[in-house]
Amino acid sequence: EVQLVESGGALVQPGGSLTLSCAASGFTFSTATMMWLRQAPGKGPEWISTIDGNGATIYENSVKGRFTISRDNTKEILYLQMDSLKPEDTALYYCAGQSLGRSVGRGKGTQVTVSS
């Protein structure tokens, strides 16, 4: 059974940092293309970043230079390091992936709130 479980969300002040984790199981994580997305209240899902099985990364423009996606294939965990957080980063963050050309679905998400 495929499982994606996010953690690490919290209330943080503007300018602060957080690291999100996504623990994966039930598929071949090391070769999967993994991504982070977010959904703010009243808005649709927004793609943030992708990392492929070779470690190549791409970012949405509004987070480029502030967020860093990474993976630990031994632990089967996907990370999102978020720095210089802004109120507009407030959202439910979730991970998703593709393995062998098929979607492995998404997790339930972890809430990030940026507020003073």
Image (cartoon, helix red, strand yellow):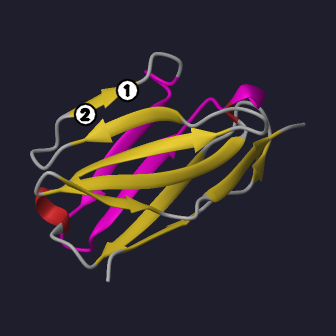
Instruction: Residue at the far top: name it.
Output: 61
- Secondary structure of residue under mark 1: strand
Alpha carbon of mark 2 to alpha carbon of mark 1: how far? Answer: 7 Å
Residue 64 position, x and y percent, is: 44, 21
Q: Is residue 93 above or below residue 59?
A: below
Q: Nearer the viewer, residue 72 or 104?
A: 104
Direction from residue 72 to residue 17 in the image, left or right: right
Q: Which mark is residue 57?
A: 2
Image location of residue 75, percent across then percent down: 27, 74
- Return the x and y of residue 103 as percentages of the image width and height: 28, 55
Tag on residue 59?
1
113 to 66, vertically: above or below: below
Quadrant containing the C terminus is top right
Q: Is residue 75 magenta?
A: yes
* Residue at (62% x, 29% y) in the render: 84
Q: Is residue 6 left or right of residue 50?
A: right
